[in-house]
Image: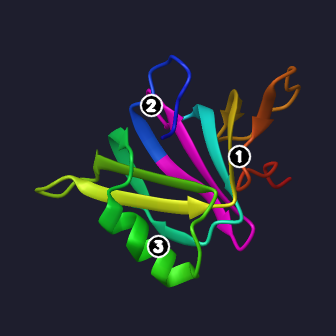
Amino acid sequence: MIHLPDGSWWDWDVVSWNAGRLRLGASHDLSYHHGLEPVFSDPVFVICPASFHDPTFREPTPAEARIVSRQVGETPEVLVAFEADAGGPEPASGLIAAGQLDIVQGTVFRYWRENLEAGERLAPWVSPPEA
């Protein structure tokens, strides 16, 4: 089960995803920044909406655990399940299996900004304005 620090984590999206890492971003409003990043290292199975709201994290069901074990050939170190509002008529289900989960806090700006302070950084897609 995933345990999040206290905070207003209403809006969520996929910040980055490659073969070695799935990084989600969460905040009360993702327009300008986010302050929480669950980082899944070595993701091996992912069902996750690109953006979603107000997730309810829970223990995976035995059926979900079996699906993942059949797909990847073993029981992963981390298995996280959730339901969330992804804009459809019914809640969307999420299921993420990975080798490790780290919860990273700090302000991540989603727009160009100079003179970052300690604990602040830019989202991976942000670049300086063209001259």
Residue bearing mark 2: 29
How would you classify the magenta stretch by its main secondary structure?
A: strand
Q: Residue 66 appears at what percent x and percent y?
A: 40, 72
Q: Give the range drawn in magenta.
A: 13-31
Asked if residue 80 lies left or right of residue 101, the reply is left
Dot 3 alpha-carbon crowd within 10 angstroms: few under 14, some 14 to 19, many 20 or more: many
Q: Indicate the amino acid at tag 2.
A: Asp
Q: Which of marks 3 and 2 is in front?
A: 3
Q: Quadrant of residue 40?
A: bottom right
Q: What element carries label 3?
A: helix
Question: CA gap, disc 1 to disc 3?
Answer: 30 Å
Q: Nearer the viewer, mark 1 or mark 3?
A: 3
Please say whether residue 16 is one of the residues in the magenta stretch.
yes
Above or below, comparing residue 21 to residue 4 in the picture: below
Instruction: Please tell me the numbered disc located at residue 123.
Output: 1
Above or below, comparing residue 71 to residue 8 in the picture: below
Return the residue nearer the eye: 34 or 69: 69
Q: Residue at x 60, y 64 (%)?
A: 76
Residue bearing mark 3: 68
Q: Residue 2 appears at what percent x and percent y?
A: 51, 38
Q: Indicate the amino acid at tag 3.
A: Val
Q: Is mark 2 on a helix, strand or loop?
A: loop
Asked if residue 53 lies left or right of residue 115, the reply is left
The tag earlier along the polypeptide, 3 or 2, is 2
Q: Residue lying furthest left in this view?
A: 89
Q: Indicate the amino acid at tag 1.
A: Ala
